Amino acid sequence: MKKINIYIWVLLASIMTACSDWLDVKPFDQADEEQQYSQAQGFYNQLNGIYRKMASPELYGQELTWGFMDVLAQYYDMTNYSPCKNYNYRNLAKLDYEQPRVKAYFKKFWETTYNAIANCNNLIQFISVADSTLFPLRERERQCIEGEARALRGLLHFDLLRMFAPAPGVDSTGKYIPYVDYFPTHITQTMATNELLGKIMEDLAEGHRLTMSFDTLYVGNISNRANFLELKRGGDINRFMNFRGYRLNHYAIKGMLARVSLYRGNKAVALKWANDVYGYITKKWFRFTTESDIKYEKNMKLYGDVLFALYNNNLTLYESKANDGVSQLAAWDYDGLFAGDNTRDFRRYQWYEDKGNRYWAAHKYKEVDKSYDYGEYSNPMIPVLRCSEICYIIAECSYESNKAYAESILNYVRKSRGCRSTLEQSNSLGEFIQLIQKDYRREFYGEGQLFYFYKRLGLDAVGDGRNLIKYGQKFVFPIPESEDI
């Protein structure tokens, strides 16, 4: 491994001057670390810079959500007559990983994600020994920032593992990627997948522990959905710590622990964490979006049940560049996607028909006029984890011990999205997973999760023209030749 290249992210203007300043952190090389971390603001800047990096178009702002990952999951029409003129994406849809421009994506994912991890490590090393008197809320606040950074480090390693290593059910002992937990790092060894998943779980569990004191004391910051990151009014605590509704907070970390546990194959642990989150759903902390919200108020991202999201104020600009009138990402199978519920499932409003060009395109990341209440909040939002995934986890993990309960949980999601058709019968876990998959395809357009679902379970995808896409070894991205992190 080569030396990690790191930017220390320094906020050039005070975070207090505007509610969205933290979304506009600028990179600055060779920052004076002692000065950077001599006050609470320096820690805020570094954590916010990590979030900003994650929300860049190279990562979750496009490619790891509605771009590269959803092309790979075969959401889009890539036939000869496709309205998509992005030939990088067209080669990707064919799993042509050797095409030079496709290979460039893998290099970018590797380098950019490890750069964000390096920034997590830098923050963790300073915050773990920081004097708690630096922070307005003292030790609770110091612990919360450290816990959030550790959880982010775990999440970033997890997504690298999901990209560059086989699923654990295929190979849990092979060594594919390094786990980096110290800054600076010059040489790092790869780690066996099962060991690396253990380190990821440790990071998330420690993040869960460290955020508990703050997030359970100031519970209104999470349970009150008015506490979006762009909240314009003040609060009884400093503004940085008040905007935690969509950050990787104590409750979102529970959801990540469920996601990682299921990927690891530990259904009992996954069910435990998922049930923890489900308790907050039943308490109505998180509410599934109503039909009127999406149909009339343009809440295309259904953000009432989002557990963790990133923000980027340029997000709609990225979408408009990708879908510029010359080229358009369009659904290849809209009718099949909503078969049986095409007049009731209100997720169909996330797609619109261009009758002149005869295709269905997605509304989800298009700019919503700010005259709609939801536009201001929705436009920059990148959903990363939502309550529906928690329900799918509960359903899958419960099926073999309590089939009726598992079916009721899957139906709960379907009915919460407007479905009224009867759930098809299943006689095995495999058949039930096919039913989950059907709903998964409707639910997670634009969020990059469908490919990982296929990979974990070793499933083929249905591509345009209704051809089976057999990923096989293409489930694993090639590690960049330079391994330059």
Image: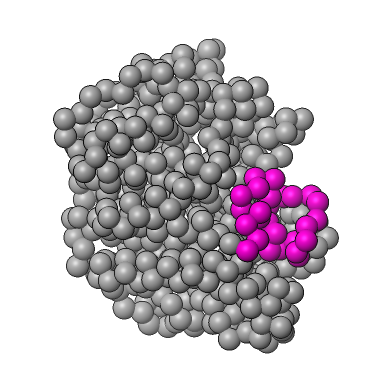
Residue 431 appears in view: yes
State the residue in front, 68 or 263.
Answer: 263
Residue 89 visible within the image: no
Q: Say if 268 sits above or below 483 in the image.
A: above
| Residue 474 counted in the magenta span | no
Q: Is residue 27 above or below residue 356?
A: below
Spot occupied by residue 117 in the image (x, y as percentages of width and height) = 48, 69
Q: Main secondary structure of the magenta part?
A: loop
Residue 304 placement (x, y as % from top left): 58, 39
Looking at the image, residue 134 lies above or below residue 63: below
Residue 101: where, in percent of width, then height? 41, 50
Q: Residue at x 74, y 74 (%)?
A: 136
Please state if 297 lies on the left or on the right of 470 as rendered. right
State which quadrant residue 391 falls in.
top left
Q: Is residue 315 left or right of residue 481?
A: right
Highlighted magenta segment, given as a residue range: 217-243
Q: Residue at x 72, y 50 (%)?
A: 230
**Looking at the figure, which quarter contains the C terminus?**
bottom left
**Residue at the limit of the structure toward the left, as seen here:** 427
Identity of the residue drawn at 68% across and 41% down: 377
Q: Quadrant of the N terminus?
A: bottom left
- Give the tally of numbered discs: 0
